[in-house]
């Protein structure tokens, strides 16, 4: 029983669950400290209620589960790729059957999305109040639902399998895991019908449009065999490396721009320092990539892949700090 649970734990790829969990919590904290906090808009002192804390706890858990479901469904449709790229994965070895994995993903999707119907912002504080809220008040639910559809579009042939297309693949990763993730977190505390959460989400979207390709270089053999024309498969290692390089730097420069144009309502100095620091970190990562682009294809987890995740998590924490101080 324990061994079986360990197999399923591996299939969810637990390391990748931390960024969405952290991203949603960061988005909620950002909304709490913003000028769009519902108490502030109502002319009241900003405060964190027990209902808000419970809502964020529920929403962040759902975000991790949604990412787990996405990882499982991706492996269901990537068995052909993984026979070459990752032959030790449970679905490839047969330790977990394809049908079982598919139904496991369905259960995870349901558990991840359905509960978000209860994510309704103040003044809906009680369960009855949340259930009685009008459809447009359930912003978080519809954002999660849209995110779920993007994960199907990325992996499943019936939904287009955008993974097979170099540019569409990156877009269908960056929209849910970059933009929508931040907006979903925001929508747990404040309304997403403001420019600010989408501007923040846009920063993470632009970062992932390029940075998400770091995982594709070491998977070129399996992706090419399965007909997935990722950036490095389509354009070659060196050209693809040059194409993704600006996305490690440019998006972070939008942070000081947003801070000093009042689009972002967090602490200007923290946002400026964070943006410039991340841009410098991105420049260093670009040097690692461009110093020997072919090394990206030789190593399963190139340092740039690790830097991508660490930069994203640092940005999440930094945004939360900027809106708390």
Image: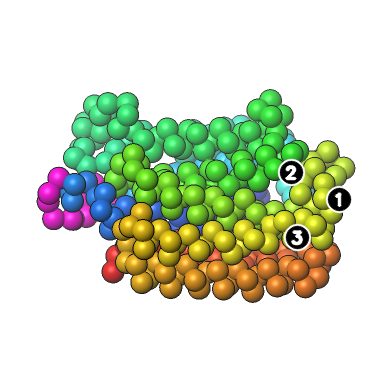
Residue at 74 percent across and 43 percent down: it is 166
Quarter assignment of residue 154: top right
Quadrant where the C terminus sits is bottom left
Q: Does the magenta portion include 165?
A: no
Residue 232 shown left or right of residue 129 in the figure: right
Taking the spot 32% from the left edge, 29% from the top edge, the residue there is 136
Q: Residue at left 18%, top 55%?
A: 46
Q: Residue 321's x, y, as percent?
A: 35, 67
Residue sitting at the far left: 44
Is tag 3's residue or tag 2's residue first in the polypeptide sequence?
2
Q: Residue 115 at x, y = what percent?
A: 39, 36
The residue beneath circle 1 is 221
Q: Which mark is residue 166?
A: 2
Q: Nearer the viewer, residue 45 or 70?
A: 45
The chosen color scheme is rainbow
> Residue 43 in the image: x percent, y percent?
12, 49
> For the residue labelled by badge 3, is the local secondary structure a helix, a strand or a loop?
helix
Q: Is residue 184 left or right of residue 207?
A: left
Viewer-side residue, 156 vs 284: 284
Q: Which residues make up the magenta segment? A: 42-55
Residue 112 appearing in the image: yes
Label 2 sits on a secondary structure element that is helix
Residues at discs 3 and 1 in contact (Cβ within 8 Å): no
Q: Are marks 1 and 2 in contact (CB under 8 Å)?
A: no
In the picture, measured across the screen, residue 319 lies left or right of residue 72, that is left
Q: Residues within 10 Å of mark 2 (few under 14, many from 20)?
A: some
Q: Locate residue 13, reporting x and y percent.
A: 62, 53
The answer to whether one can see residue 313 in this image is no
Q: Between 92 and 166, which is closer to the camera in this rendering?
A: 166
> Disc number at residue 241?
3
Instruction: Measure the alpha-carbon separation of dots 3 and 1.
Output: 17 Å
């Amino acid at each position: 029983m324990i061994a079986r649970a360990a197999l399923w734990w591996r299939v969810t790829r637990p390391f990748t669950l931390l960024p969405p969990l952290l991203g949603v919590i960061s988005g909620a904290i950002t909304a709490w400290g913003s000028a769009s906090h519902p108490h502030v808009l109502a002319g009241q002192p900003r405060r964190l209620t027990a209902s808000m804390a419970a809502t964020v706890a529920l929403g962040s858990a759902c975000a991790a589960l949604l990412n787990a479901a996405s990882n499982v469904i991706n492996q269901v449709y990537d068995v052909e790729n993984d026979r070459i790229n990752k032959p030790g994965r449970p679905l490839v070895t047969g330790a977990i059957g394809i049908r079982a994995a598919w139904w496991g993903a369905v259960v995870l999707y349901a558990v991840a999305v359905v509960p978000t119907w209860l994510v309704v912002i103040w003044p809906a504080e009680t369960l009855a109040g949340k259930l009685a809220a009008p459809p447009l008040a359930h912003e978080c639910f519809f954002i999660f639902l849209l995110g779920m559809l993007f994960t199907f579009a990325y992996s499943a042939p019936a939904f287009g399998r955008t993974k097979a297309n170099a540019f569409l693949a990156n877009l269908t990763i960056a929209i849910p895991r970059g933009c929508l993730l931040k907006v979903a977190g925001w929508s747990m505390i404040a309304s997403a019908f403001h420019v600010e959460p989408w501007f923040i989400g846009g920063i993470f979207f632009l970062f992932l449009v390029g940075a998400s390709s770091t995982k594709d270089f070491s998977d070129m053999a399996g992706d090419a065999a399965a007909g997935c024309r990722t950036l490095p498969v389509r354009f070659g290692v060196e050209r693809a490396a040059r194409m993704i390089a600006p996305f490690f730097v440019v998006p972070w420069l939008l942070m000081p721009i947003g801070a000093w144009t009042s689009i972002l309502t967090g602490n200007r100095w923290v946002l400026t320092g964070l943006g410039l620091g991340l841009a410098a970190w991105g420049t260093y990562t670009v040097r690692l990539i461009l110093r020997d682009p072919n090394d990206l294809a030789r190593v399963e987890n190139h340092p740039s892949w690790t830097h991508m995740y660490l930069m994203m998590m640092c940005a999440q924490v930094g945004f939360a700090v900027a809106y708390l101080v």
